[in-house]
Image (cartoon, rainbow, N blue to C red):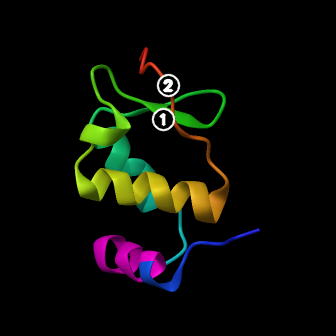
Amino acid sequence: MPQASDELRAEMERMFGDPVSDEGPMQFLRERGWTLNRDWTWSKLGQTLQSMPQDEYLCVLFLVHEWDFGGVKEGNNA
């Protein structure tokens, strides 16, 4: 069930022109070197959740809250 906040949806609309689509955030993350794993987590070699740029973090957060993705993979073994 979608549960992203109105603020997060507004940010996705500002960034991608659509407040609920997963297409823009997914493409954005892939273009920045993130890999979507089979367990619906994201990973990027050498990247940690704590050091993610804010725009990438917001995309992952949106995908987790709105689309039930699994977040950032622990260990980042991409």
**Which residue is nearer to you in this view: 9 or 17?**
9
Task: Residue type at mark 1: give it.
Answer: Trp
Quadrant the N terminus occupies: bottom right
Among numbered discs 2 and 1, the one appearing first in the sequence: 1
Disc 1 element? strand
Q: Residue at x 64, y 27 (%)?
A: 38
What residue occupies the far front of the structure in this picture?
50
Q: Is residue 34 visible in this depiction of the protein?
A: yes
Name the residue that disc number 1 marks. Answer: 42
Quadrant the C terminus occupies: top left
Residue 21 horizontal side relative to residue 46, left or right: right
Q: Residue at x 69, y 71 (%)?
A: 2
The region drawn magenta spans 8-16
Pointer 2 with pointer 1, Cβ within 8 A: no
Quick one: label 2, few (<14), some, or many (20+) residues within 10 Å? few
Q: Residue at x 35, y 27 (%)?
A: 44
Name the residue that disc number 2 marks. Answer: 74
